[in-house]
Image (tube, helix red, strand yellow):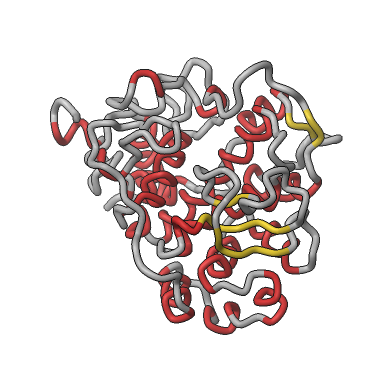
Amino acid sequence: MPTADDHAAWLTEALAAPPRPPNDPNLFSSNTLFGESGIYPQGTPMEPATGPPVTVDAAVAALDALGIERAADRLADEELVARAPEPGPRAGLIALSVTVAAPVLDAFVVGGTPVRHLGIGPTASPGRIVGPPSDDADATTPTRVVNERYRAEVPTLLAGSLAHDLLWSGPGAGQYEEVVLHALVALVHLQLIARTPALARTGTELARRQNSLAVTLLNSRHPGRADISVRAPDGPGTIPGGAPAMQTPDFWSIPFVRGTPLTAEAPPLLGAVLERITGAVPPGPLRYDDALGVWWSAHGTGGALDRDAQWRAAVALGLLDQDGASGGERRGNGV
C-alpha cells in the first residue's frame, strides 16, 4: 500500500516534469485585449460575463464555494460594507481571508491601506481589473473601482487583483513593484483554484486573464524542479505551446513596465504577506528591487501552496491530468 512518502515522491515527480501545453488553451487569454496579446492565440475569443452586478446571494454562494465559514455574516460586516458597499467587490475582498494576502484584507478594514473605499465603475485605464476611477487617472484619491466590465463575474475571481491594488503605489509603479504584485495576484488565484477548481473553468474573460498569470507563475521554475521560483532565468519557458512573443523563461522576466527597472521602497504590509508565502522574514528595509526577487526565489512559495495544493491547481488549469501525467503527454503532441 502506498505510503505518505510514496505520495510525496509521486507529487514531486509529476510537478517537476517539463512544462507541457495545457489540455485546453481556452482557459487562457487568446485575443489581443487593451493592447496586450493573449498567451494562447489559438483559443476562442474572450468575453466577460454579462448581466447586472453580483447580488448578495451570488456573493455568498461564491464564498461558500471556497469553504469560507459564516460567509453571509462576513459579507454583512458593517465596517467592510462601509468601505466596499457593492457585494461583488466585498466578496472578492473576503476571499483574501483564505489566502496569503489575508493581512491586506485586515489592513483595509481598519483603514491601514492607501485605498480606503472600493466600488464598481469605469477605470481610468480601461484594461485594469481594479484601479483608479476614470475621473482620477493620477490616483490622488483613496478610492479604487472594480472595472465595470467585470461587474457580473464570479466575485472571488477579483481577489488577486484587489490585493494588488491595495498594495500598489500608483500609476508610477516600476517594473520590480509590478512583477512582485502580479506574482501575488497569480499566487492568490492559484490558492483559490486549488480550493475550488471550478473557479478556473468559468470560461469568462476575467477567469482567463487570471488563469494566464497563474499558469505563468506555476511554470516558473528551474529545470527538473517542482518548486515554483519567481526568478528562474534558466527556466524552460512559462507558456509552452503559447505565443512565442509572450514566452519568458520565468515570471520575473515578464515586462510589466518598459524601460530600465527602478527600485523603490515597499510597504511593510507586503513584508507580512511575503512572510506568509515563504515562512521567512523578508530583508529590511524592504525594497522593490532585483535582490527581492532573488530572496523570494530562494525561500519559495511553500507557505502558500504545499505540493498537494500545487498539484490541484495544475490539474484545474489542465497542466496535469488526475493521474499526474502532463496534459501534453496524455494528448501526445500537445496543442
Picture residue at 78% right of the left edge, 68% below the top: 110
Question: In this orientation, does residue 240 appear?
Answer: yes
Q: Which residue is more in the foreground, 1 or 285? A: 285
Looking at the rendering, which quadrant does residue 302 occupy?
A: top right
Question: Quick one: quadrant of the C terminus?
Answer: top left
Q: Is residue 2 above or below residue 56?
A: above
Question: In this orientation, does residue 98 appear?
Answer: no
Looking at the rendering, which quadrant does residue 105 occupy?
A: bottom right
Q: Which residue is more in the foreground, 135 or 281? A: 135
Indicate the position of residue 139 as horizontal and vertical percent values. 72, 47
Q: Residue furthest front?
A: 135
Indicate the position of residue 133 as horizontal and vertical percent values. 63, 54
Q: Is residue 258 above or below residue 174?
A: above
Q: Which residue is more in the foreground, 273 or 77? A: 77
292 left or right of 323? right
Indicate the position of residue 152 as horizontal and vertical percent values. 41, 65
Looking at the rendering, which quadrant does residue 243 occupy?
A: top left
Q: Which residue is more in the foreground, 85 or 209? A: 85
Picture residue at 38% right of the left edge, 51% below the top: 207
278 left or right of 210? right
Indicate the position of residue 132 as horizontal and vertical percent values. 65, 51
